[in-house]
Amino acid sequence: MRQYNKRFLIPALIAGSFFTFSCSDDDPDPIITEGIEKSSLVFTEISGGDELSAHGDHFHGITSAIEGESFSIEFDAEGNAISGGHLHLDPDGFYKIELQVWDYQGNRIEGNYLKDKATADMYKAFLLGGDFILNPETTDETGAIFQPRDLTYGDGTEVNGKYETTGVLSYFTVGESNEGGTTSVSYVLREFSSADTKATVERVDWNSNDYTSRFPGKDVLTLDFEIHAEHDHDH
């Protein structure tokens, strides 16, 4: 019987096994278990007669407003719009915006940003881009307003005033001064490096292009879409 030299046989078997496994084309893709799988922004038209109006950097009459039609933009894990990403809005219209976020287990997790005041103090929503004329910059209340207006934290305590609001719930109008054309915008949820930063964010800062330097931190969610503001246009 032919004899094999064990000194060479064992390393050869190990090398062959390594080659077989490392070159396989059937290796499964890694399973992602953490992070954001998808997001939505739900726009709901609101109305309220003369009581609902734009005033400087905020709205009047939101509490008694009547809700109408809703429509959604769906986003993938990278924040790219996969449906509804070209949005037609009435420039004079008022809209409630609700953020919805899912993890890879199918759980809704936007409430994690608002579970209590200490947590929410680390986050704020911005609506960037668009080159909007802001409402306080006009003399006839025809500019854009984006107003975060969360009412309660997840633990049931009340959100107290404009500096505590985050923007998981917010309200928006494009304004007559911004009618026409298509503009690219990004809904950004920013996590601050310090909880003290949130109290320095004013209502007019929602569209500031220098927000990264003024409010240190990182963007945990960036949702990109387009707005076309025109009268008598379907969504």
Image: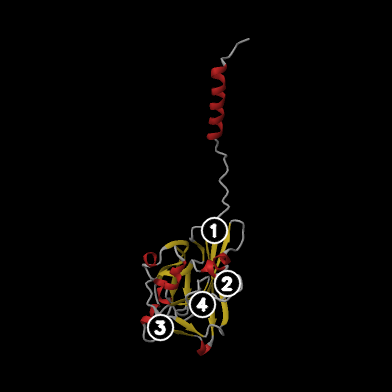
> On the image, numbered disc 1 is attached to which residue?
36
Query: What element does badge 1 sit on?
Result: strand
Indicate which disc, 2 or 1, sits on the residue closer to the N terminus: 1
| Earlier-in-chain disc, 4 versus 3 | 4
Q: Which residue is mark 4?
A: 95
Q: Is residue 164 shown above or below 113?
A: below
| Position in image of residue 17 (x %, y %) | 57, 29
Mark earlier in primary sequence (4, 2): 4
User: In this rendering, which labeled residue sits more in front, label 4 or label 2?
Assistant: 2
Residue 111: image quadrant is bottom right
Q: Position of residue 205 (x, y in %)?
A: 40, 73
Residue found at the very far right of the displayed protein:
1
CA–CA distance in space, label 4 to label 2:
22 Å
- Confirm or deny contact between disc 2 and disc 3 (CB under 8 A): no
Q: CB of mark 1 within 8 Å of CB of mark 4?
A: no
Residue on which disc 3 sits: 142
Q: Is residue 185 left or right of residue 159?
A: left
* Residue 60 visible from this viewpoint: yes
Q: Is residue 121 above or below residue 45?
A: above
**Picture quadrant of residue 116:** bottom right
Circle nearer the N terminus (2, 3): 3
Q: As drawn, is 76 to the left or to the right of 128?
A: right
Secondary structure at badge 4 equals strand
Q: Could you classify mark 3 by the number of other residues whose Cα lies within 10 Å: few (under 14), some (14-19), or many (20 or more)?
A: many
Mark 2 or 3, closer to the camera = 2
Choose between 203 and 143: the one closer to the eye: 203
Q: Quadrant of the N terminus?
A: top right
